[in-house]
Structure formats: structure tokens, C-alpha cells
Image (spheres, helix red, strand yellow):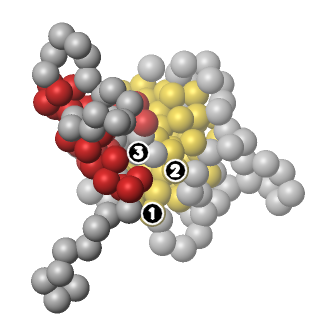
Amino acid sequence: MNGTLHALPKRDEQQRHVLLGRCDACPSVTSSTSPWWHDLSIRRLGVLTVVFACCLPVPALAAATSKVELWTALDGNLGCGAAIHAPGKPVSEIICSDIRIPAPRNEGPADGDPGFLFLASSGRPVLARTSQDTFAGTGNPVKLRAGTKWHLGTVNVTCTISAQSVRCVNGAHHGFTITKRSYSAF
């Protein structure tokens, strides 16, 4: 380059003049009632709007959906996933574990640990005590972030994770909400 100005090809020169609104030989880009810079400002505003819209956070309606088999939320205190099932059979319910889940009522001898529930595609959540690992997923659970939805393909249950709560609903509109302080079924 060495300080020498290079001429732009004719097409590029015309495009520059069109953008600047100064091309008599080029197709008109201005209206007869407004100055050339008005139309240019409108075009720039449209381009800037598109550029800035791409940089905005994704709204909650477009939340990511996770399909992992085993996950945690609420600072790792709640664990949920596919419930253990017969080999060769599809998963039919999810299981969740949290200290806020109460023990089942009207039970016989207290075998197993409280704080578990099962939720199938229909019906209400079932509180349970378990004495062994009843999660189908193995390995380390995935920590789901606020704004994530979780769905397990063979079970019609969707869980929505927020920073303060997890709400899981089945196809019959039954389910539960666990917050950092409480558990409630519906």
C-alpha cells in the first residue's frame, strides 16, 4: 500500500455512493420528501437492531431441553432421573430424591430411607422409601441450570428448573414442586 490510494472497482464505488446517498447514476435510494441521510439513518438503525438483537439473552420460552438420564438441581440437593426398570423394557417413571420430600404415610415398618418419590406419565407422585439405588442412570449426574427443561422420552414428564424451584408435570397435569424450602404435590 505504501500510502498510495487505490481506486475502487466501479461496482464498489457505486455501492459506496449508494450507501452515502450521493450517486446520480445509481438507482435512487432516497425518497423525494426526505433528505438522503434520513433513509441512510433508517437503514443503519435496522442493521443495528438486527446486530443488537443477536446479542440479547435467549428468552425463557426458548429454554434448552435436556434429556440426560440423571441430573441435579437446586445447588445439588435435588436429584432426579429415570427410575430403575426391567431389562429390555422402557422407562415408565422418574424418581427424585430430596431431603424436603416427606416419608410416605400409613406405612408399615420403616424400611429404607425417606425422601424419594416416583412420577409416571399419569397419576400423582408416589412418596417412597428406598433401601437401594433405584436410579437407572449411572455415573455422575449432570447439573441442570436455571432456565432448563428436562424431558425423558418414554415418560411423559417434563421438569422445569429455575434458580429457586423445580416443577415436574406429567401428561395428566399432576406432579410436584420442590423449592429450596418446601415440597408440594398437585
Where residue 121 appears, x then y in whole percent?
Answer: 66, 30
Residue hosting label 2:
66
What residue is at 83 percent from the left and 51 percent from the top?
Answer: 89
Nearer the observer: mark 3 or 1; the answer is: 3
Q: Earlier in the sequence, mark 3 or mark 2?
A: 2
Q: Measure the alpha-carbon separation of dots 3 and 1.
A: 12 Å
What residue is at 34 percent from the left and 36 percent from the top?
Answer: 25
Q: Quadrant of residue 131?
A: bottom right
Q: Mark 3: which secondary structure?
A: loop
- Note whether 1 is above or below 93 in the view shown: below
Q: Residue furthest bottom?
A: 2
Where residue 11 appears, x then y in whole percent?
Answer: 41, 53
What residue is at 72 percent from the left and 48 percent from the top?
Answer: 91
Where residue 53 appears, x then y in whole percent?
Answer: 28, 39
Q: Earlier in the sequence, mark 2 or mark 1?
A: 2
Q: Amino acid at mark 1?
A: Val
Q: Are marks 3 and 2 in contact (CB under 8 Å)?
A: yes
Residue hosting label 1:
142
Q: Measure the alpha-carbon separation of dots 2 and 1.
A: 10 Å
For the question of whether residue 104 can be seen, the reply is no
Q: Amino acid at mark 3?
A: Thr
How crowded pointer 3 is (Cα within 10 Å; few <14, some 14-19, many 20+) is rated as some
Q: Looking at the rendered structure, which numbered label has been put on residue 121?
A: none
Q: Earlier in the sequence, mark 3 or mark 1?
A: 1
Where residue 69 appears, x then y in whole percent?
Answer: 59, 57
Q: Nearer the viewer, residue 16 or 186?
A: 16
**Residue 160 in the figure: left or right of residue 163:** right
Residue hosting label 3:
148
Q: Quadrant of residue 164?
A: top left
Q: Are marks 3 and 1 in contact (CB under 8 Å)?
A: no
Q: Are marks 2 and 1 in contact (CB under 8 Å)?
A: yes
